[in-house]
């Protein structure tokens, strides 16, 4: 009877200990010291070890989170590099080359005297060179006619080049607007750089047009001035030739049928 009471008592103590361990983990250490020998076979909960394990797990979780964030940053860096290496989808090179070729074509159509050093030297030797006082009237008239045609042709060429350059203004404005818009909406450094390079190319094309207009106008002015200078030289030669003629010799003049 006494043994049965002792067994029941041990069972009750074990049940109470189990409830305490479940509800209050921190009381396990106390129960381990005060429970009967029947509890010696139970697993003892160490709060210090448990806290250390939780802290270690938290640190490992933080490390994994840091690695994930690092991989995310690397992926974003690769995306940004891809954007920086993306080429500009807009190109105005063909349009700019066409404008330059048009201006060059108009300049190459220069009449009579082209933009060529040898041709200019030959023209000034034969047409704008020294004037001979013994030249015949037909020779002088032919030279004056040639110089006049050169001047008129040069002024016509100048006007054509100016008209061609003015015609490029609208296309240049359209190209500039497209390039500025592309530069502002560039997704990366390469697109912005390419848009800037094309804007510089547009500026170079406009400078080429300006050089063409200036050259054509200067050519026309130079030929007109050369014509004026040659005409003055001819006039001086003719006057000198007239002044060196024999003096006037008076003679009898018959008027009104000899009356």
Image (cartoon, rainbow, N blue to C red):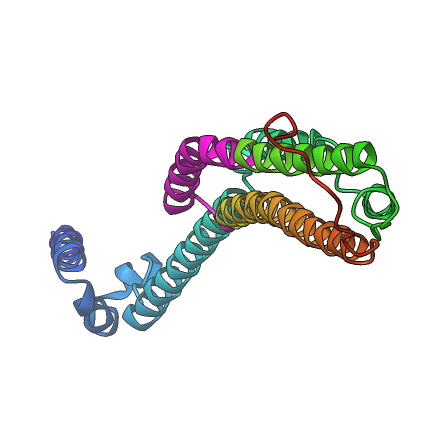
Q: Which residue is at a point 13% across and 59% down the rendered structure image?
A: 20
Figure check: 166 above or below 7 = above
Q: Which residue is at a point 88% across and 46% down the rendered structure image?
A: 134
Image position of 237 (left or right of 90): right
Q: Where in the figure is residue 5, as x and y percent of width and height? A: 11, 54
Q: Where in the figure is residue 147, as x and y percent of width and height? A: 71, 38
Q: Which residue is at a point 68% across and 54% down the rendered structure image?
A: 232
Q: Where in the figure is residue 208, as x and y percent of width and height? A: 60, 45
Image position of 24 (left or right of 144): left
| Camera-side residue of 5 and 154 | 154
Q: Is residue 54 magenta?
A: no
- Answer whether residue 113 is visible to the viewer in this image: no
Q: Residue furthest top?
A: 257
Image position of 45 (left or right of 79): left
Figure check: 141 above or below 17 = above
**In the figure, residue 258 lies in which quadrant?**
top right
Q: Residue furthest front?
A: 259
Q: Which residues are magenta?
A: 161-190
Image position of 243 (left or right of 76): right
Q: Is residue 170 magenta?
A: yes
| Camera-side residue of 107 and 177 | 107
Figure check: 21 above or below 32 = above
Q: Where in the figure is residue 15, as x and y percent of width and height? A: 14, 52
**In the figure, residue 91 lies in which quadrant?**
top right
Q: Quadrant of the C terminus?
A: top right
Tell me the chief SS of the magenta region: helix
């Amino acid at each position: 009877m006494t043994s049965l009471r002792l067994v029941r008592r041990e069972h009750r103590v074990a049940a109470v200990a189990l409830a305490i361990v479940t509800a209050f983990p921190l009381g396990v250490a106390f129960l381990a010291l005060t429970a009967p020998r029947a509890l010696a076979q139970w697993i003892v909960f160490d709060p210090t070890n448990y806290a250390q394990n939780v802290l270690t797990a938290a640190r490992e979780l933080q490390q994994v989170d840091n690695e994930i964030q690092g991989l995310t940053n690397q992926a974003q860096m690769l995306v940004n590099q891809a954007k920086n290496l993306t080429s500009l989808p807009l190109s105005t090179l063909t349009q700019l080359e066409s404008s330059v070729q048009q201006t060059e074509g108009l300049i190459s159509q220069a009449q009579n005297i082209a933009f060529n050093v040898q041709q200019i030297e030959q023209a000034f030797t034969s047409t704008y060179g020294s004037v001979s006082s013994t030249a015949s009237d037909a020779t002088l008239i032919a030279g004056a006619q040639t110089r006049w045609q050169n001047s008129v042709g040069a002024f016509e060429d100048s006007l054509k080049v100016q008209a061609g350059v003015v015609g490029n203004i609208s296309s240049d404005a359209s190209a500039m607007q497209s390039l500025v818009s592309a530069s502002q909406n560039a997704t990366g450094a390469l697109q912005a750089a390419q848009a800037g390079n094309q804007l510089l190319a547009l500026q170079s094309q406009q400078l080429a047009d300006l050089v063409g207009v200036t050259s054509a106008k200067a050519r026309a002015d130079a030929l007109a001035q050369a014509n004026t200078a040659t005409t003055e030289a001819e006039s001086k030669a003719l006057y000198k030739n007239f002044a060196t003629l024999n003096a006037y010799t008076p003679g009898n003049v018959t008027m009104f049928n000899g009356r």
